[in-house]
């Protein structure tokens, strides 16, 4: 396979594969650091004996909320500069390197509450840098695809991320975490000072770095247009964003409504994965080691749900898929508030994950179908920016509810509020076929 790309070069299957390897490697941050290992280590071990009335889980929620706010402030700048030709690979390399550096520094977070603040800072800064690294990475999608296969190439990257997470979680579990006693896993790593978890963090950093390298060599950089050298500047980026949103308000309020609704429910979907493992250990009694097995199952179920939703999306439309997925998640979340024990969490947790994949997949196709021909790049830029603009809501509300009720279980209410508000906002949005028929400004 060889196809023309934006810069007039060519892309091959090996380049597509190299691009997808970054997604495979990035599972080291998403699955190991944010979701199933390091964040659980911070709340279950490092902050277990934290003095004061605020739990480690609440501090985790607030630190991720602060990171989300920083992302919202920086996203307009990085999002618009990502398309500046001649800078994508350099930006991707620099940001990925700094993320890996944060991951390596997490090795120094020992199992002692005095190290909780170091862990939270590194997790927050790493989360900001990781989100910003995705901007040039996503921008490179057009370089490794054609208009007729961009969806398949994007889906390939998404699948690589899911399955990369599965493989790495299994390696971490059997190599460093499984078992009891003072040493764990097949490698017999000591648990003293959390050494086995700290070793996992180093493995995750090396994993990400290794699989991020191929794209930097295989995919060519685009030539820089003469007038794109400097970009709009920091404040100029916000002026451009404001002008784009004003134009949508005047000409296509339905699309603007979808941007707002999807930003809300996508943040709720992210919160389900972010805090699922923390809840599993701190509330439902799943061993901190066994939660990795739940993580593997969750990734498999979410991937299968996303694959199955593609057919329903084509038959029923993306809005129907999203509405039913969010409604099902709200029901499962309410039931999760009422149950106790590992079995209840396994059943209802996997039900939640089953509908995360379809909602994420249909959200992207909804945006694609609403986008006018020739303006897809601009619309997906707004899609990414608005999503990041509210990315602090779920972690902040999770921490707030957990603190208000002095119970981490209550944090689920914060996630349900975000999902519910997103669902209500989506109900007012016309599906793509109706919007295209009736016009967008009404």
Image: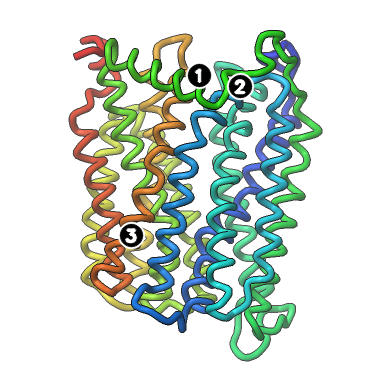
Q: How far, Cα to Cα, is label 3 from label 2?
A: 34 Å
Residue furthest to the right in view is 217
> Given this view, does label 1 or label 2 mark the residue nearer the observer?
2
- Up-down relation of residue 235 to residue 127 (above or below): above
Q: Which colouring convention does the figure follow?
A: rainbow
Classify mark 1: helix, strand or loop: helix
- Position of residue 143 in the picture relative to residue 371 (left or right): right
Q: Secondary structure at mark 2?
A: loop
For the point 75% across and 28% down, the residue is 219
The residue identified by callout 1 is: 377
Q: What residue is pinned by disc 3?
A: 398
**Distance (Cα) linking label 1 and label 2:** 10 Å
Marks 1 & 2, CB-CB < 8 Å contact? yes
Q: Position of residue 263 (x, y in %)?
A: 35, 37
* Residue 214 position by quadrant: top right
Which residue position holds label 2? 83
Which residue is nearer to you in this view: 409 or 243?
Answer: 243
């Amino acid at each position: 396979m060889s196809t023309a790309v934006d810069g007039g070069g060519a892309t091959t299957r090996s380049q597509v594969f190299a691009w997808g390897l970054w997604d495979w490697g990035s599972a080291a941050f998403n699955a190991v650091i944010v979701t199933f290992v390091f964040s659980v280590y911070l709340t279950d071990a490092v902050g277990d004996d934290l003095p004061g009335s605020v739990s480690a889980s609440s501090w985790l929620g607030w630190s991720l909320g602060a990171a989300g706010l920083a992302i919202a402030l920086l996203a307009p700048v990085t999002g618009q500069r990502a398309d500046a030709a001649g800078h994508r690979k350099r930006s991707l390399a620099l940001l990925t390197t700094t993320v890996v550096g944060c991951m390596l520094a997490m090795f120094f977070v020992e199992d002692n509450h005095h190290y909780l603040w170091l862990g939270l800072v590194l997790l927050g800064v790493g989360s900001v840098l990781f989100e910003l690294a995705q901007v040039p990475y996503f921008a490179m999608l057009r370089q490794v695809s054609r208009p007729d296969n961009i969806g398949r190439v994007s889906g390939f990257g998404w699948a690589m991320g899911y399955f990369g997470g599965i493989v790495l979680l299994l390696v971490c579990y059997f190599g460093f975490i499984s078992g009891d006693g003072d040493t764990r896993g097949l490698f017999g790593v000591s648990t003293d000072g959390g050494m086995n978890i700290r070793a996992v963090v180093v493995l995750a950093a090396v994993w990400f770095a290794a699989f991020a390298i191929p794209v930097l060599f295989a995919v060519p950089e685009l030539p820089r247009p003469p007038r794109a050298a400097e970009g709009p500047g920091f404040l100029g980026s916000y002026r451009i964003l404001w002008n784009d949103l004003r134009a949508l308000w005047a000409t296509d309020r339905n699309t603007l409504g979808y941007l707002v609704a999807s930003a809300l429910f996508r943040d709720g979907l992210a919160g389900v994965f972010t805090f699922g493992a923390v809840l599993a250990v701190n509330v439902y009694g799943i061993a901190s080691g066994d939660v990795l097995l739940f993580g593997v199952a969750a990734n498999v179920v979410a991937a299968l749900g996303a694959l199955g939703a593609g057919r329903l999306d084509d038959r029923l439309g993306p809005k129907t898929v999203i509405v039913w997925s969010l409604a099902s998640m709200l029901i499962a979340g309410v039931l999760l508030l009422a149950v106790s024990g590992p079995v209840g969490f396994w059943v209802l947790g996997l039900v939640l994950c089953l509908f995360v994949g379809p909602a994420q997949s249909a959200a992207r196709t909804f945006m694609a179908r609403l986008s006018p021909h020739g303006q897809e790049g601009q619309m997906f830029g707004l899609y990414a920016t608005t999503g990041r603009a509210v990315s602090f809501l779920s972690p902040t509300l999770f921490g707030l509810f957990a603190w208000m009720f002095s119970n981490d279980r209550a944090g689920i209410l914060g996630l349900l509020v975000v999902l519910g508000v997103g669902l209500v906002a989506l109900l007012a949005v016309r599906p793509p076929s109706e919007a295209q028929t009736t016009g967008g400004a009404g």
